[in-house]
Each structure stands twice: as C-alpha cells, then as structure tokens.
Image (spheres, coloured by chain):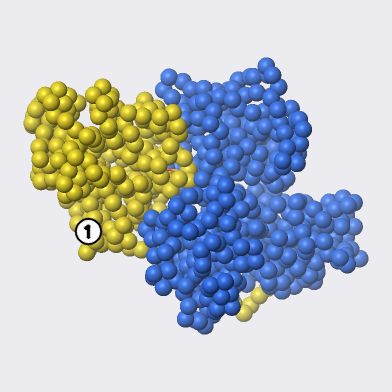
Chain colours: A yellow, B blue
Amino acid sequence: MVTITSVAPRRFFGMEGFKLDRQMFEVMTKETLNSMTKRMQVYAPHIANKARPGQFIIFRVNEKGERIPLTVADTDKDTGAVTIIFQEVGKSTKELGELEIGETVLDFVGPLGKPSELDRIGRAAVVGGGLGCAIAFPQAKYLFNSGTQVDIIAGFRTKDLVILEDDMKAVSQNFYMCTDDGTYGTKGLVTDVLRGLIESGEKYDKVLVVGPLPMMKFVSLLTKEFGISTIVSMNTIMIDGTGMCGGCRLTVGGETKFACVDGPEFDGHLVDFDEAIRRSGMYKDIEGEKNAQHVCRLEKM
Amino acid sequence: MPNMSKTKVPMPVQEPDVRNRNFSEVALGYTEDMAVEEAERCINCKHKPCVAGCPVNVAIPEFIALVHERKFEEAYYKILETNALPAVCGRVCPQESQCEQVCVRGKLGEPVGIGHLERFVADWYMKNVHKLIKPAAPNGHKAAVVGSGPAGLICAADLAKLGYDVTVFEAFHATGGVLVYGIPEFRLPKNIVNHEIDNLRELGVKLKTNMIIGRAFTIDELFEQGYEAVFIGTGAGLPSFMNIPGENFNAVYSANEYLTRVNLMRSYDETYDTPIMKSRAVAVIGGGNVAMDAARCAKRLGAETVYIVYRRSEVEMPARIEEVHHAKEEGIIFKTLTNPVRITGNERGYVNGMECVEMELGEPDASGRRRPVEKKGSEFMMDVDTVIVAIGTSPNPLIRTTTPGLETNKYGGLVVEDTTNMTSRKGVFAGGDAVTGAATVILAMGAGKKAAKAMDEYIRGVIPADS
Ligand SMILES: Cc1cc2nc3c(=O)[nH]c(=O)nc-3n(C[C@H](O)[C@H](O)[C@H](O)COP(=O)(O)OP(=O)(O)OC[C@H]3O[C@@H](n4cnc5c(N)ncnc54)[C@H](O)[C@@H]3O)c2cc1C
Ligand code: FES
C-alpha cells in the first residue's frame, strides 16, 4: 500500500462550484393577475438587452426541476428586468410562483427562438386565448407602436380569469372581449368574434393568434377560409431550446421543424395541429403523478 | 521478466444482471496489484507504435514503466504532459482503433490494456493526491471560450496556465458538454467530470452557464467586451432524423433528447422532475457509442426488450468494442443488417411498432465500407413502443448564422486553418465536433490544445493579425 501524507485537503467545489457558475437571477417584482396566473420581473440584463417580441426564455427553479420555456412578455433595458407571465399549472410553474421578491431562479436562459416578423403590416387582428394574451401582448404592443392598426380579440373561460385588459386596451384601436360562459364581454369563442368582424367587412392583412392549441387550430381554419395570412405561436415541450434535442419538433407544411429554433412562430395554415396536440400530451400521465406529489411551501410550514 | 500472458488482466465489472438495473459505473477499475501485473505485459519495445497511435501522443511506455515501479503519482504526471483528462480518456477513448490497435503484444494475443492503465493512474491520483493547483500569474490578457465540452475545457485550461483571464460560456445549466449530457453515469461517472472542472476553477477559469453565444452575445460582442481571441467549441449537437413516416409519434426520441433527459436531467431518479417514457420494448437505431448508450439506458430504465437496429453488419459498427460487448452482456438484442422503413402509432399518437427491411452488403461505398442494400420483400414488423434515433448529429448553425464571415463546409462544420485552428475570422479559433462533426473526446481535446497554443501566439503577436 502506498500512502501519501503531505496533503492539504483539496478544495472541492461540488455543488458550491455549480452555483458559482451562475449569475443570480433575482425576482424583482411579483404580482398576481388572477387565481392561477402570475407576472414576475426577473433580473437578467443580458436577456433584457436582446430579447425581441416573440422570443422566449427557459427557466429551472431548482436543481431537480424541469427546464420550462416561457415567452418574454416585456423587457426593461434600464433595470435589466425580463417580464414573464405564467399559469401555475405544473410543478415547476407552481414552484416558480412560490418564489418571493429577492429570491433567485436557479437557471434563466435566453433569448431563444426567432423574433416575430412584425414589420410593414397595415392592419392586424391579434387574437389571444387565456394565458395566450400574455404572449400576444408584446406583439400587439410592438405593432401598435410601429404604426400598425391593431384590433385585439381576447377570450377567457370566465370573468375571474381575465388578465391584462387595460394593457391590451392601451395598445389597440379596437378591443373585443369574450368569455366562454358570458360572464364578461360577449358570450362565445374568439373564433365567433373574429368571424363576425371579417364577415361584417373588416379587412386584416395579418392575424396573430396565441392560445391553447385547439383554439389556434380553429382560428387558422377560419382565416384560411378567408385567405388571411396567420401566424401562430407554438409552445411545445422543450429541453434545451437551442436545437439540440428535437423534442420540440412539429410538422409544418409537411416538413419537420424545431419550434425552439425555427419558431416559435409559424404559418398557422401549414401547422399540423393534430400532431402537435398529441405531442403536447406525451407526458400527461406521468406529469399528473408528479403534480400530485408537489406540496406547496405554505402547506409544508 | 515481462508478464507473457496473452490476455489482459481482466477488468473487474459489475455483474451484467445487476448492472443493467442500476446507473453505477460498470467497470470497477484495477487494484494496484492488477495494474502492476498488467504493466508488466508491456515489453517496452523499441519503436513504440502506441505513442504514434495516440492522437495526443501520450508517453505510453514511460507511464506504464512508472506504474510497474509503483510510482503512480509520477505516472500521472507523465500522462498529464500531453493529456489533461486521463480519467475521462481512460474510460471513453476507442483504444482498440488507436494505441492498442498497434501494440506489439496485440500480434499474439491481446494488446496491453493501455486504457485500463490510464484510467487506473488517473483514479489513483484523484483518490490519493490532494494538491492545490496554483493559478498562473496573470498576463493581463482576456480570452473567451464558447462551449464547455472537452475541446473548450482543454483550451481554457491551457490558456489559464499561461496566465490568461479566461471565461467559458456554456449554453446549458451545467458544464462538460457531451461528457455530462450524453455519456451516461454508468460509463463515465459525473463526479469525475466535475473533478476535472473543479481543477479548471482552481486555475482561475471563469465558467458562465446559461449563456448562449449567438443569442445573449454574438462573437463580435465578445470582442467588444475586451476578449482578444475567441475559441468556438460548440460541438455537433444537432440531431439527424431518418425522415421516414411516423417519426413524430409520441415516444420517438432523438438519442440526444433521450440521453439528456436521462443523464443531465436525471429522469431515472424519481426525485427529479423531468419525465421520460416508461417503455416496454425499445428500438435504438444506429451502431455507434451513442446508440449503445441509449440502449443501455433504456434497459436500466426498465424496458423488457431493447434492440439495436443497424443497417450494416456488426464489424462495421463504429462503437467501441467494449461497449458492444457490455451491451450484449446486459441483454441488448442486436438486429444488424436491418433498416427501419416506417414507424406506426396508435390512435392516441403513441408508437406501437416499427416496420423494418432486411439488408445485405453490396459493393464498397465512398467510406470503404460495403454498402447495405435492401433485400426485396423482406419487410417485417417489430413490436416496440419506443424508438430512439441515434444516426448522427451535425454542428449547430446558431453561431455560424450570427457571425458574419465565418466559413463552414457543406456539413456545417467550421473551416479552420490546419496548424492554428483559426477560422476564416481573425482571432476566432475553433475545434472539436464543431469543426469535424461528431468525432471523439480525444480528438476534441487535441484540437482545443492546438488552438490554445495558437491563440496565445496570436494574442502575443507571433501570428500577425493581418496574415
Ligand atoms: C452519447 C455519446 C457517447 C459518446 N461516446 C464517446 C466515447 O465513448 N468515446 C469518445 O471518444 N467519444 C464519444 N462521444 C463523442 C464525444 O463525446 C464528442 O466527440 C466530444 O464530446 C466533442 O467535444 P466538443 O468539446 O467538441 O463538443 P461537446 O462535448 O459537444 O460540447 C459542446 C458544448 O458547447 C455548448 N454549446 C453549443 N452551442 C453553444 C452556444 N451557442 N453557446 C454556448 N455554448 C454552446 C454545448 O451545450 C456543449 O456543452 C460520444 C458522444 C455522445 C453524444
Ligand atoms: S427544445 Fe431541444 S431542439 Fe428544440
């Protein structure tokens, strides 16, 4: 046996080093928009400097968490803030929502994806469904500020879930609200409102639609009927967000595309929505189990 | 008197039926006595073909002689002269097509277990020697490294040793590149990679994770921030698919996705959140290390049946022999000369089978290997519920599309000057899979090393900036 004696214990960074490599992504502000939706500003100046409408970030709350994509809802170059709006639907988004101001998100990477192509559009209809309004809002704002005539159609399940109403009104010429149950605005779906507008003679150069997959599918079918060019935003399952795994793939015009690098925005008339809907549910059963295991920090106290 | 045994001292391993249910390392490593016994098999021949067979020319007979004398620490320093990651290389290098292929002892029996000995020396050092690494005196210059795979890590280490203020930018939340997201724990334990990365920190290298170059900053912006030279070691991460019908059904994965979910996101550990399909029967398509790793992970995650589906025959498989051997022992079924033609799915969109066709070998193709051709009418169905595609990867276009003036070849690899690894952009160097396409750890390291030397010369003005 050989023994070595002259040893100063080696500094082992382990987890410590792991943390050293990171910038501190601090939660700067946090608001509740409705019972299941929160808005947060996270300190990430290099992303705030670069992000354009349509781009997204990927976050991970803690060492054991998943990597989850979220659209950049707004940025502030002066304060270095990146705004995200999210629904607390899964374990990771719940954990994100539990972070307090001053606490940090472990990982926050971006900006990812291609920015929206929003220039030289005369008149646009921006259609948002539920949380999709948060994703559509920065686009509407950009269009409005660059001189496009913007009509916004916002749809929610019910009045209690309405978010961003004032923000959206501020960046549109006409604002239409509808709820599934009629508790606020007109009763009905965004497709009903959009069809009404088109049939009554409103002309749009472009329709932007962000919301649940079935909603984007039906809006796209409707606009196809009228030959109006339509952009949808595909929030697929992702890991890296850089084109390295292909988990985010979808079929567009018969070709396989990666949502994270070729998108997230695509021509709504070309997307295979049925496949996208199937793929989005890939882990539903497994997620259900994990979700059930999650105990809110408040409950643990 | 040399040890004239025709076979290597066997490497202790976990029993196949035990290890195919856990993620702990398969090969357990030599003891000191085993290492000395194996070292005695080296006859210290005069012309040392092994040294020339090693892409970084490790002084193999010398380090083996030191092992023989039980001077393990000295043996470590001998290897370190040309190879900064011996613990990694001892485990993952394709020795059978490099140093061991040309070993004189291989003519009459097995070659000397050079890889096993390299690994032993590195592990012994890690366990027994604890020396603080002193950072070099700063030379006042800044350099940036993009990507923290083996190419980037070695480039950063070499520059730091010369006194450079080096920052490594990594897109993922963890450093190590393929060594952490691709190669599984049971083949390359992550604490070994982390140990090497700790060494880098001690050398004063700054590591920045969550930084995608091309998005957060462009290469040009790195120069604006005061970095005087940049190394691109971004690997070949873009997965290829087969473009056959059914490839987008649920539970068809690229090997990159499957391995990332398992290795980096640790979905095999219940306490981690990232989900992975619970599969019953898995087909992995491809014959390289990546395919073997994916198949062995699938088995460990509980799949009853795991197939390797490869269109050529076993001799053409590019995987390390040891991995093929281990995979077979663990119960992976090899379907060679078989090519998938379509994947079928159920009404919910999940894979429920794969149609394949049998192949036979025809005339040699451009690669010198005999080209596989379809046997007409030999189509058959495979009963699988998961398909993993491991047919190759290519370099990610992100940097090339955001850096004006960066030349690439038709496969998307960055074009570099042979002796310096400088790209078509002044002060921008590149190496590893980003240049060659998917290759090996040792070649990536060699390129990182070469580039570091040239970057130093470039910054010091030895290579004129306007050459
Ligand atoms: C599953 C698997 C098994 C393998 N087995 C073996 C084996 O047994 N033996 C062997 O010799 N080789 C093996 N290889 C090949 C070997 O791992 C690679 O050749 C080697 O890692 C290449 O090193 P690299 O430094 O060029 O790139 P990589 O290791 O790919 O590292 C590149 C890094 O750059 C990062 N990056 C990419 N783009 C950006 C960007 N824009 N900004 C910032 N960072 C970025 C990536 O996230 C990654 O961390 C295997 C590969 C795989 C996938
Ligand atoms: S998220 Fe991995 S390729 Fe798009």
In the depicted structure, whether residue B381 falls above or below residue B9: above
Instruction: Give the residue drawn at x 69%, y 25%.
Output: B374
Label 1 resides on the chain identified as A
Q: Is residue B371 shown left or right of residue A283?
A: right
In the depicted structure, whether residue A77 falls above or below residue A120: below
**In terms of depth relative to the viewer, which is nearer, A185 or B113?**
A185
Q: Is residue B447 shown left or right of residue B100?
A: left
The residue furthest top is B377
Instruction: Give the residue drawn at x 62%, y 56%.
Output: B441
For label 1, the SS is strand
Q: Quadrant of residue A273?
A: top left
Q: Quadrant of residue B326?
A: top right
Where's residue B12, x and y in %? 72, 51
Q: Tell me the quadrant of the picture where the N terminus of chain A can be found.
A: bottom right
**In terms of depth relative to the viewer, which is nearer, A254 or B88?**
A254
**Amino acid, disc 1:** Asp
Instruction: Give the residue drawn at x 51%, y 68%.
Output: B427
Q: Mark 1 points at which residue?
A: A76
> In the image, ligand 2 is in what quadrant?
top left
Q: How many labels does the image show?
A: 1
**In terms of depth relative to the viewer, which is nearer, B307 or A294?**
B307
Q: Quadrant of residue A69?
A: top left
